[in-house]
């Protein structure tokens, strides 16, 4: 035996590393009664390096047959009245439920509404409480008729928890309105409030008791057996239980034989993982215990570490929810975000990503779910994980995420079986390099438009495959890549992410170039994704900064960059011909270098020798624009005095005044206006200084905007796409600037071809902005108050699902019953079609006040209620 083997034996580690056994383990788990989804995930991850015999050591302690385990309704607890309970008068309809007044009291103080063994309720009991973490379908969920919990179930829970000394219990089944029957609108509001209290409820609980029907049948309190059983159970598959354990201070797992501390489970697995593989057990090393340890360690609360999105994403990658909204809603307590009861899943996930922008960018290669509506490069939800690589973050910018990627242009798509994509990648040869990939089932079903958009991009020559690592050589597990459609309005590498791919075998002739990309925030498959990207691009265009450390070869350029007037004079006036307008590879002349560097004397010397004052660079920048961009007031004055036109701009570049506005440089704006800059001049992209100021300004500084308005800028000018200064301000969310524009005559009622400011506010869920627009005369009713396709403001609010916006519009006279659009829909029809249940309930509640019967039929002769039933089939 060699020294390494002796050392391994002394440490209790095998001298030979374990080999993956996922195929055999999966079949063994299926034979034990576990479902395909759990068996597959465990076999590929936590139990990949286990033997069938080791798995048997756990299941041999299970007091359940494979047929019982296979039953998805296997209960943790069930209503089974004993003779003593019947003698005590307990019957099948003896349910416990807090009064509505008690629910409102707990919502008012964001407190824990707890129950004791007698069925009495108390908010924040002084003796403390234990919180339950369980799967509703396993017996402790609220009654289907919304009657609460049967008294016998409460008794069983307290009997099981007797060793813990529990006197009060908090469970969501009783404390939060729910159940099989749909809640009323007022109950939904209370539910949203109570969800915001859940983080503190689980943090402050003396114990969080984990009930899983499979683990409750485990005849063991051994940490390893409990860990495996917990991973095999359905408790690990629910999104809500993730946040419950993540917030728990003292979590305990209930088994048939007693309770086991979750912390002791993690500690035992850590010790065994380290003993098995040594250092690296907590990173990528494999073996019997490292994977199991890492999974449960990620669930443990760590007060010294904040919860990051990659942790949540991986922790929830295989979890499920009965309601789609819960895929986002369940994350809010863990992240400390406030839940708005009318948020839809798109808005909720946007809030999740914007709460942790840096970590959000590490999830670009999270493969499985389709892409989010915003940011369009991130997964729409976390459950549905197929493959994932957590990458280093890029830079979150105004229009997208900037980062370097290995880039290959996609030449063609080779027809293949459904779900499989064979890409031909450019490599300078014919044919190119072929690459076999897989599209996730979720993307195919939920976002088929994304797949079609990419196919169209391939046909138009704008399709690219981006990866974080080379695609060769072949490795055992798939790599993840992005299929991107290039945004051709920009000369840089910018694009929309259409979908992610699991990349398998790739030919050795594959080639890729590392390039910086801006992955745009908009999803190209959404209704206005591409249109919004185009508008944002026009609004953000600006001059490029002076080149840093650019190696100039022309002596005149070098002299101008340094401001060496003597050298400039010597070269220009010396013997021989000196081309003062010679351009470097970027299109820069000596005058560009001098202007960008701020050397007014050098600018004067070149201008006196008749250097051209308006040659554009490759980026369409004139010397004046570069001087403005770099805030060189003296240089600007020198150029204008020498004859440069203060209003001139290159065919594809911004004007000097727009450049100053985008820099937020009030003094430069004042100077240019004093030099007779046209305050309303639109550049080649129809962008005016006022629109640029409206978009660039923040909510605390409106100096630039005030200067332009004071100089007579047209507050109602609009670009060819229909963008007005007010619409740009609303897009940016700058309420102060919007009020200033409207105070000086900006029309809050955008009519075609204008883009409506109010519609922007509604689509962005910006109630304060909408309120400001309404205060200044934005119309919400009447023939003139119609948006694109004939929709009303209330119909747009119904499409967004924003009840707060609906309430505001209704208070200002919006017609709740107006019919519009080709579909001949009402707001209630729109809410039904978009699946916005809360808005639907709110409209119904409001209509009861007037006795409206909702008999309006759409173009297909369906009422809103019929449309809702049809949409849910």
Image (spheres, helix red, strand yellow):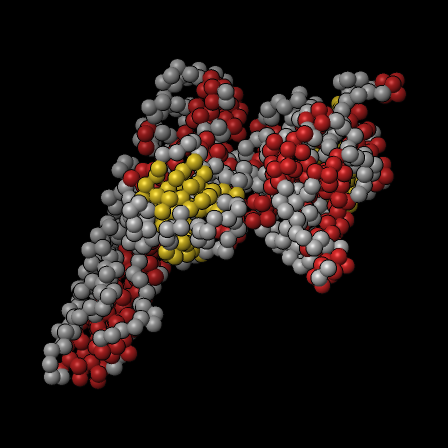
Pinpoint residue 5: horizontal percent, then vertical percent.
71, 59
Looking at the image, residue 454 lies above or below residue 548: above
349 displayed left or right of 215: left
Residue drawn at x 29%, y 50% as measured from the top left: 429
| Residue 117 placement: quadrant | top right
Looking at the image, residue 48 lies above or below residue 418: below
Residue drawn at x 75%, y 47% as measured from the top left: 265
820 displayed left or right of 621: right
Residue farthest along the front direction in this orientation: 1
Looking at this view, is 674 or 259 the one in front? Answer: 259
629 displayed left or right of 190: left
Residue drawn at x 35%, y 61% as measured from the top left: 664
Pinpoint residue 487: horizontal percent, then vertical percent.
32, 47
Residue drawn at x 33%, y 33% as measured from the top left: 787
Looking at the image, residue 579 lies above or below residue 81: below
Pinpoint residue 70: horizontal percent, then vertical percent.
68, 26
Q: Quadrant of the N terminus?
A: bottom right
Looking at this view, is 218 or 162 the one in front? Answer: 218
| Residue 526 placement: quadrant | top left
Work out whether residue 750 can be spotted.
no
């Amino acid at each position: 035996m060699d020294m390494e083997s002796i050392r391994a034996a002394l440490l209790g580690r095998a001298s030979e590393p374990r080999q993956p056994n996922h195929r055999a383990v999966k079949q063994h788990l299926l034979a034990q009664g576990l479902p395909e989804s759990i068996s597959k995930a465990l076999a590929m991850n936590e139990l990949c390096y286990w033997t069938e015999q080791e798995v048997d050591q756990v299941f041999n302690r299970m007091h359940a047959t494979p047929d019982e385990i296979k039953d998805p309704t296997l209960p943790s607890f069930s209503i089974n009245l004993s003779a003593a309970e019947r003698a005590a008068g307990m019957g099948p309809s003896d349910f416990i439920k807090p009064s509505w007044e008690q629910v409102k009291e707990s919502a008012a103080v964001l407190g824990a509404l707890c129950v004791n063994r007698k069925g009495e309720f108390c908010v924040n009991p002084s003796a403390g409480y234990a919180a339950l973490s369980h799967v509703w379908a396993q017996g402790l969920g609220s009654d289907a008729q919304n009657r609460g919990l049967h008294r016998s179930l409460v008794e069983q829970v307290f009997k099981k928890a007797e060793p813990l000394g529990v006197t009060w219990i908090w469970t969501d089944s009783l404390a939060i309105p729910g159940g099989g029957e749909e809640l009323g609108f007022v109950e939904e509001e209370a539910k949203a409030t109570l969800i915001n209290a859940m983080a503190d409820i689980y943090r402050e609980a003396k114990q969080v008791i984990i009930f899983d029907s499979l683990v409750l049948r485990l005849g063991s309190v051994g940490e390893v057996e409990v860990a495996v059983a917990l991973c095999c159970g359905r408790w690990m598959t629910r999104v809500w239980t993730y946040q419950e354990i993540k917030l728990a201070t003292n979590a305990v797992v209930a088994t048939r034989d007693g309770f086991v501390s979750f912390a002791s489970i993690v500690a035992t697995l850590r010790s065994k993982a380290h003993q098995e593989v040594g250092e690296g057990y907590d990173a990528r090393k494999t073996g019997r215990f490292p994977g199991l340890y890492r999974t449960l360690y990620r669930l443990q609360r760590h007060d010294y570490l904040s919860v990051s999105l990659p942790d949540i994403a991986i922790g929830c990658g295989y979890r499920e929810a009965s309601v789609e909204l819960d895929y986002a809603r369940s994350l809010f307590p863990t992240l400390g975000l406030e839940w708005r009861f009318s948020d839809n899943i798109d808005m909720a996930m946007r809030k999740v990503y914007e709460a942790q922008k840096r970590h959000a960018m590490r999830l670009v290669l999270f493969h499985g779910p389709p892409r989010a509506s915003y940011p369009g490069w991130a997964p729409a939800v976390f459950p549905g994980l197929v493959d994932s690589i957590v990458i280093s973050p890029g830079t979150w910018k105004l229009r997208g995420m900037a980062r370097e990627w290995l880039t290959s242009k996609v030449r063609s798509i080779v027809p293949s079986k459904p779900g499989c994509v064979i890409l031909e990648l450019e490599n300078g040869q014919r044919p190119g390099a072929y690459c076999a990939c897989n599209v996730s089932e979720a993307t195919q079903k939920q976002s088929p438009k994304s797949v079609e958009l990419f196919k169209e991009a391939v046909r138009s020559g704008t399709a690219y495959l981006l990866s974080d690592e080379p695609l060769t050589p072949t490795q055992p597990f798939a790599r993840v890549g992005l299929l991107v459609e290039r945004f051709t309005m920009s000369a840089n590498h910018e694009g929309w992410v259409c979908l992610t791919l699991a990349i398998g075998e790739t030919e050795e002739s594959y080639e890729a170039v590392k390039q910086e990309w801006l992955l745009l925030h908009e999803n190209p498959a959404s209704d206005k994704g591409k249109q919004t990207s185009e508008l944002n691009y026009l609004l953000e265009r600006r001059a490029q900064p002076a080149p840093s450390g650019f190696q100039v070869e022309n002596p005149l350029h070098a002299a101008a960059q340094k401001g060496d007037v003597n050298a400039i004079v010597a070269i220009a006036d010396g013997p021989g011909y000196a081309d003062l307008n010679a351009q470097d590879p970027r299109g820069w002349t000596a005058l560009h270098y001098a202007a960008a560097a701020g050397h007014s004397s050098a600018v004067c010397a070149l201008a006196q020798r008749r250097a051209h004052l308006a040659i554009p660079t490759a980026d369409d920048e004139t010397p004046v624009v570069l001087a403005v961009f770099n805030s060189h007031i003296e240089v600007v004055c020198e150029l204008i005095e020498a004859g440069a036109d203060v209003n001139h701009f290159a065919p594809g570049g911004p004007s000097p005044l727009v450049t100053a506005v985008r820099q937020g440089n009030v003094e430069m704006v004042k100077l240019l206006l004093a030099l007779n800059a046209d305050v309303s001049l639109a550049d080649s992209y129809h962008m005016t200084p006022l629109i640029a100021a409206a978009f660039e300004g923040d909510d605390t500084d409106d100096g630039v905007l005030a200067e332009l308005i004071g100089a007579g800028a047209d507050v109602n000018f609009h670009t060819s796409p229909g963008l007005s200064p007010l619409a740009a301000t609303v897009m940016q969310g700058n309420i102060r600037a919007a009020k200033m524009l409207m105070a000086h005559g900006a029309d809050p009622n955008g009519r075609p071809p204008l883009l409506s400011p109010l519609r922007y506010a509604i689509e962005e869920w910006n109630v304060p902005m909408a309120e400001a627009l309404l205060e200044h005369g934005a119309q919400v009713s009447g023939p003139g108050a119609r948006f694109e396709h004939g929709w009303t403001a209330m119909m747009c609010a119904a499409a967004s699902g924003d009840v707060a916006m609906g309430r505001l519009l209704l208070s200002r006279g919006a017609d709740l019953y107006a019919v519009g659009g080709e579909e001949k829909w009402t707001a209630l029809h729109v809410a039904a079609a978009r699946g916005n249940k809360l808005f639907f309930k709110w409209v119904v509640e409001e209509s009861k006040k007037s006795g409206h019967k909702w008999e309006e039929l759409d173009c297909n002769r369906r009422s809103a209620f019929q449309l809702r039933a049809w949409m849910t089939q």
